[in-house]
Amino acid sequence: MTKHVFHPSILRAYDIRGIVDETLTLNDAKAIGIAFAACLRQRGYGNHVAVGRDGRLSSPALAAALCDGLVAGGARVSDIGWAGRGLVILDAAPHRCFIMLVSPSTPTPPFK
């Protein structure tokens, strides 16, 4: 496996944020999925992840790439589609799984 190189501005201590097709790509989303699945496995946390997304035009493709990476990394994915954080949490709780959201923290340009 080759080492993935991320744009230096997208990885933060508390989240991952970038401008789609400029600083954040579908390959980045897939690499994040692979890495997250590896972390779950290495730490013994199980392998089930619920993925939700917002309504931006870029969200379906980013969520699909993230899911592809999670599956490639050995995770079981529940892609619940368009949903807010609360709905993803409600879906994840009974299944005891981890949560990943493809959503904006700021709905202002250029992050729309």
Image: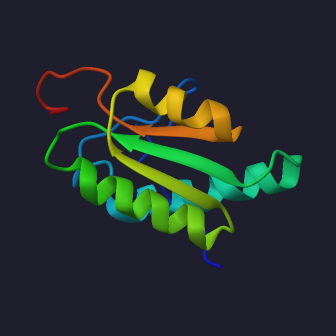
Query: Farthest residue toward the front?
Result: 94
Residue pictured at 34% horizontal, 62% vertical: 26
Residue pictured at 30% horizontal, 48% vertical: 23
Relative depth, front residue between 25 and 43: 43
Query: Farthest residue toward the bottom?
Result: 1
Locate residue 83 relative to residue 86 in the image: left or right: left
Residue pictured at 85% horizontal, 54% vertical: 42
Locate residue 81 relative to residue 21 in the image: left or right: right
Quarter of image, res 66? bottom left
Q: Position of residue 73 (x, y in %)?
A: 65, 67
Residue 30 lies, with reference to residue 1, above or below; the image says above
Relative depth, front residue between 58 and 79: 79
Residue pictured at 47% horizontal, 46% vertical: 51
Q: Position of residue 101 (x, y in %)?
A: 43, 37
Q: How is the image coloured?
A: rainbow
Quadrant the C terminus occupies: top left
Relative depth, front residue between 80 and 73: 80
Quadrant the N terminus occupies: bottom right
Q: Position of residue 27 (x, y in %)?
A: 40, 65
Residue 97 lies, with reference to residue 74, above or below; the image says above
Q: Position of residue 31 (x, y in %)?
A: 52, 61
Relative depth, front residue between 71 and 28: 71
Q: Is residue 4 visible?
A: no
